[in-house]
Structures are given as structure tokens and as C-alpha cells.
Image (cartoon, rainbow, N blue to C red):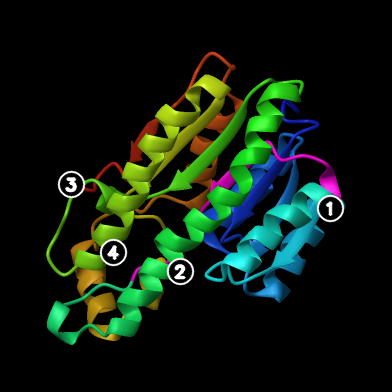
Amino acid sequence: MSRDLEGTVALVTGATSGIGRAVAVTLASYGAAVAVVGRRSDRLDELAAEIGERCLVLPADLRDPVAATGAVSATVERFGRLDTVVNNAGRMLNGPTLEATLEEWETMVDLNLKALMYVTKAALPHLVDAAATGPRRVADLVNISSIAGRFANRNVAIYNATKFGVTAASESWRQEFAPHHVRVSVIEPGVVETELFGHQQQPVQEHYERLFADVEPLLPSDIADVIAFVVRAPRRMGVAEVVVRPTTQA
């Protein structure tokens, strides 16, 4: 496998499972040093054992802006730079509005949107510097949204709102930082085989099981391959937005 990310440093949030874990492994396989962030330190330790010594474990709850800033600072302190950020941490807690709790809504806003904002705010100065001084002369901010960030559906109001926010913010940042050769990309997956659906209340889980019974879901490695393509692209090429669904998902 090509080592064309050798000498670069990536920070991946939500790295304890699913897409985040797959992204960390994939970027490391291309030569990047990787800082992995999540709340389950035992899983981060297992991931670091798989990746090797060029992996920095950063247990953190990114809903705390101090923790988010600290994760970015610790990455730069350890590796001396930051070239790539993948904002993957998120939660989906859908269901009928009258049965939803404010706590569920606040969890999605805090993790899907505010945590992403905190990490991005802290990381962007380092990304600008990496694009100006690094050997590749380009840096990447990759935000994981969802097809729910493009199309609204009933019983998905607040998840829709957070992911529409991620998609919109990503495009605004893309325009703002393009002159600095900091590429901002948003990835909008459909159904992926992760823990995301398992966080739902039981009736909601059963609804999605019926809805997607005939759909072969994407794998986390599929999304990781998309992100690897984005960040390994030549400096002249910015991939602004990627929608990726299972073949049979309508």
C-alpha cells in the first residue's frame, strides 16, 4: 500500500468504533500518525495496539470545549503538527417528537454539532499552518454528516437539524479556507453498519430494522476508503461533498 500520508498527522474523533475506528486504521495504513479521540478508553487502547506507536490515545468528552481544545493541543504537542481532522463523533436518537426527551435532543446538538464546532475552532489555525509549511502544502478538515443532512424526514427533526448544520457549516468553511489550501469536505453516508442505530429506543430500532430489512448496509471501511480518497487527493483537487448510500437504499 502507498505511504503517501507519511509525515502527516491526523486527528479522528469518535474513534472507538464504526467509521471513526476504520478511518484511523486506514489513514495510519497510508503512513499518517493518528490521534484517536473517544470516551471509551479501553477501546482506544485496543485501537492503538493495532495501529502501533504512531497512535496517540486521547480519552475525552468533546461536548466539553476545554476537552476538545485539549485534544487538539495534545496532538500538536506530541507530533508537532496537524494536517487532517476527521470530525466523526455523533449520536442519532430519533423517534416521534411527542415521545422524545429534551435530553435526547440536547445530546445530539451537543455532540453532533457543538463538539464538532469546538474541535474545528481549535484545529483550524494548525491546519492553516500545515497547508502553508508542510511538504504536501495542503490540509484537510473532513466532517461526517449524513443523508439526513440533505433530506428531512418525519421523526428525525433534531437529528436532521444537527446534520443540516454540519453540511452548511462545512460549505461555509470550505469557501472561507479554500484560499489557504485547507480543504473542507463533508461526507454524507446512508445506512452504515455501526452502533449508531443501537442507541435508539427499542421501538425505533425495530422500525429501522423493518425499513432497511432488504438493504445491505455499507461497512465502516467503505466510508474510510472514501475519506482516504479525499485526503490523499492532489493539492489542486478539493472534494467538497460526497453522498454515499448502499446500492439498494432508495
In the figure, residue 44 lies in which quadrant?
Answer: bottom right
Residue 250 tag number: 3
User: Residue 97, position in %: x, y?
Assistant: 15, 78
Q: What is the secondary structure assignment of the residue under circle 2?
A: loop
Q: Which residue is mark 2?
A: 195
The numbered disc on residue 64 is none
In the image, which is nearer the foreground, mark 1 or mark 3?
Answer: 1
Q: Secondary structure at mark 1?
A: loop
- Percent x, y for residue 146? 33, 51
First in sequence: mark 1 vs mark 4? 1
Front label number (4 vs 2): 4
Q: Residues within 10 Å of mark 2 (few under 14, many from 20)?
A: few
Whole-number angstrom distance, CA of label 1 to CA of label 4: 35 Å
- Looking at the rendered structure, which numbered label has been put on residue 159? 4
Q: Is residue 75 above or below residue 236?
A: below
Local packing at callout 3 (Cα closer than 10 Å; few below 14, some 14-19, many 20+) is few
**Residue occupying the point 68% across, 20% down:** 137
Whole-Å distance between the Cαs marked 1 and 3?
40 Å
Viewer can see residue 16? no
Q: Earlier in the sequence, mark 2 or mark 3?
A: 2
In the image shown, does 220 or 9 lie closer to the viewer? 9
Residue 184 against residue 233 in the figure, above or below: below
Quadrant of res 21: bottom right
Give the percent coordinates (x, y) of residue 115.
50, 62
Mark linked to residue 52 = 1
Q: Residue at x 35, y 68 (%)?
A: 92
Residue at left offset 77%, top offset 35%: 31
